[in-house]
Image: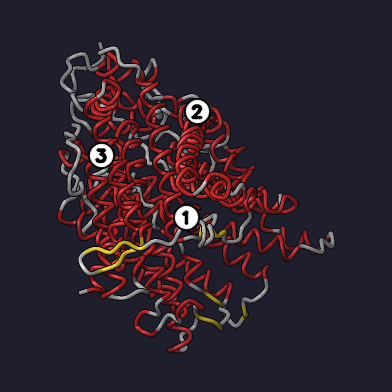
Amino acid sequence: MEFFIQQLTNGLAVGGIYALIALGYTMVYGVMKLINFAHGELFALGAYVGYSLLVTFDLAGALGPAAAIGLTIVMVLGLVGLAGHLLERAAYRPLRHSDRLAAVVSALGASIFLQNAIMLKWGARHRAYGADLLPNVTVHFAGQSYPLIRLLVFLAAVLVMTALYAFIHRTRLGLAIRAAAIDQGAAKLMGIDVRSVIAVVFVIGPALGGLAGLLVGLYYGQIDFSMGQLYGLKAFTAAIIGGIGNIPGAMVGGLLLGLVEALGAAYVSVAWKDALAFVVLIMILVVRPTGLLPERVAEKL
Amino acid sequence: MNGAARDSGLAGEASGLSRLAWLAGAALFLSLPSLFKAVGLSSGAYWLDVLNNVGLYTVLALSLNVILGLAGMFHMGHAAFFAVGAYVTAILNLNAGWSIFAAMPVAGLAAGLFAAAVAWPIIHLRGDYLLIVTIGIVEIIRIALTNDIFGLTGGPNGLVGIARPSLFGLKISRPQHFFYLIWLMVGATMLLFHWLENSRFGRALKFIKADAVAAEGMGVNVTRYKLMAFVVGAAWAGMAGTIFAARLRTISPESFNFGESVTLFTIVILGGSGSQRGALLGSFLVMGLPELFRGFQDKRLLVFGAALVIMMIFRPEGLLPPKAAKYALPEPWAGRHGPGGPGGPEEGAWPGGPGTGPGQADGSGRDEADGSGRDEADGRPAATGAEGSRAAPGGPSPFADGPA
């Protein structure tokens, strides 16, 4: 039972990270119907920006752990958001009215570019956040002890998702995003500046992905330049499982995937862990071709 | 369209001159091995290897083109079928002592059957959902191979010591041998798929790509044709896998990862989805060109990524998009388009071009699902325009109300 609960909480933390990345995929897809293949790389960028701030500049030594993490989070959100915005300007905006596959290849090119840029900047080797970066605290609850960081990662993910959900459903800008996601043309006729909606989405999504990268660095303590590919694929899978274009769907899909992976690795086979996500994906799509919580799209005639 | 108009190669009715140019180019290309030798190019073997790689990827891209380019299914998992072919070849050769060429059809068959089995439950998925599932299939295959599934695949190290192929007593071992083998396969593939593209099967696939609902309405069995496209493309990729295994003599799961699938996908879209010449050019650009920039070392891929973005921005429809499909027209219309002045007829067989042609000619408005409006959005006016007109009964056919 103890083992099970440990795996369960680990799965929730990893799932929270997947969900955060999946939000970026799903928001961009919702508005632009584009799979942002470079999103995984923006996630990795977040991990590396965090590494630079926390390890190279040793913010924790200068400010103390809490303030350092706070400042790092703000910086990661800002810088990766900016990178996402630049990416949209350079690689996607010129292709907004082109064939969708052209945008897909442009996204793949941007992904290759970013991955190699990260490698050239930070090197091809693993980078370690360092074990003594955060005080090693464990929390005792119901007769079990958990590492504090696991709890924090999960809480951070839930907090951010709740805030995003509120933003999308309670503000005028959120309303504009939802409108643009349903019908860009009609949204324009209603006076919504679709271009700036896309720009906003391309700041929020990457910023959340970058935050997820920072959380992975803090949680596992180790990052490498190609981490974006696997995490990106898994998170994209999560977004599809939940029903792409749908924000609660991304959260559900991410958490589900994290749980399946953690429990699968524990009880089925570690070697097949990475395949499990895709097996689940295929099984779900065979039964529900548009995911668990699909966006409502009428089949165009 | 200009590029397409200038040189018409395998596809379309080439004027005598350009056909001659193609032949000359092909002859020159095929004499490259002896040319390298004659000028004493010390890195000749290396460049032949590069060209062999380009050729192999051309075959793979052409096979992917059936699924992605013709049928329009977002398939980013072609490396899975390639892997099945390569591993079946290696297993038959190493465990049962089959010769490479005997294993080739079996490899193709196995890849085709595998494709039928995995595609069958997912064939109805819409665009991006299909994309992620095909990515998932590649990953599952790679992980299965790494985990030594059935105890046959050798785990992460793969299979080593695959035999050289031999043909009529000639052992195919040196790069120039493979050069001829691979490029002959490229030629055969182009001819076969060119024929396939213009067959009933190919027309059905293009119709499905243009409008699956309309195709279904016209009695095309969409599911069956989509499955067939998967099987044909996969079988051919499987046979390319045979050549791949025989050339390297060692195969391992990492040769068939997600990145390979992305490379093939990129080649097809960059070259021009649905275009054979595009697949050829794309293979040269993606597999060959980076070799010229070996000097840049680690910045090579950085430049490649940026170049990909830039090329798509300037040529969103690919570098050599497919030319207009042309079909013989019934009598009253047959005289309207000449027998192939250079570049003339392909902008549309209808007087006034595709924009004004079908749409206005069909003033009755009977044809809801006609090609014209949709085609312009596609950016390929002539291609689907001609097709839609052929297929849709209410379109500008002689049986309609006729042009105003």
Residue bearing the label numbered 2: A89
Look at the numbered disc 2 and give the secondary structure of its residue.
Answer: helix
Q: Nearer the viewer, residue B395 or B274?
A: B274
Look at the numbered disc 1 and give the secondary structure of its residue.
Answer: helix
Residue B24's tag is none
Q: Amino acid at mark 3?
A: Thr
Q: Position of residue A258 (x, y in %)?
A: 29, 59
Residue B322 visible in this rendered orientation of the protein: no
Image position of A300 with respect to A14: above or below: above
Residue that appears at 50% across and 53% down: B263
Chain name for mark 1: A
Please identify, in this view, whether the residue under mark 1 or under mark 2 is nearer the observer: 1
* Sequence-first disc among 2 and 3: 2
Quarter of the C terminus of chain B within the rendering = top left
Chain name for mark 3: A
Task: Please rate how many residues cluster around mark 3, counting C-alpha atoms within 10 Å: few if below 14, some from 14 to 19, many from 20.
Answer: some
Q: Position of residue A3 (x, y in %)?
A: 26, 74
Residue A217's tag is 1
Q: Position of residue A70 (x, y in %)?
A: 45, 41
Residue bearing the label numbered 3: A162
Return the residue found at the far bottom: B96
Q: Amino acid at mark 1?
A: Gly
Please identify, in this view, whether the residue under mark 2 or under mark 3 is nearer the observer: 3
Instruction: State the separation of the CA atoms marked 1 and 3.
Output: 23 Å
Look at the numbered disc 3 and give the secondary structure of its residue.
Answer: helix
Task: Please rate how many residues cluster around mark 2, counting C-alpha atoms within 10 Å: few if below 14, some from 14 to 19, many from 20.
Answer: some
* Sequence-first disc among 1 and 2: 2
Q: Looking at the image, do the residues carrying marks 1 and 2 touch, with CB atoms under 8 Å apart?
A: no
Instruction: State the separation of the CA atoms marked 2 and 3.
Output: 28 Å
Q: Nearer the viewer, residue B259 or A65?
A: A65
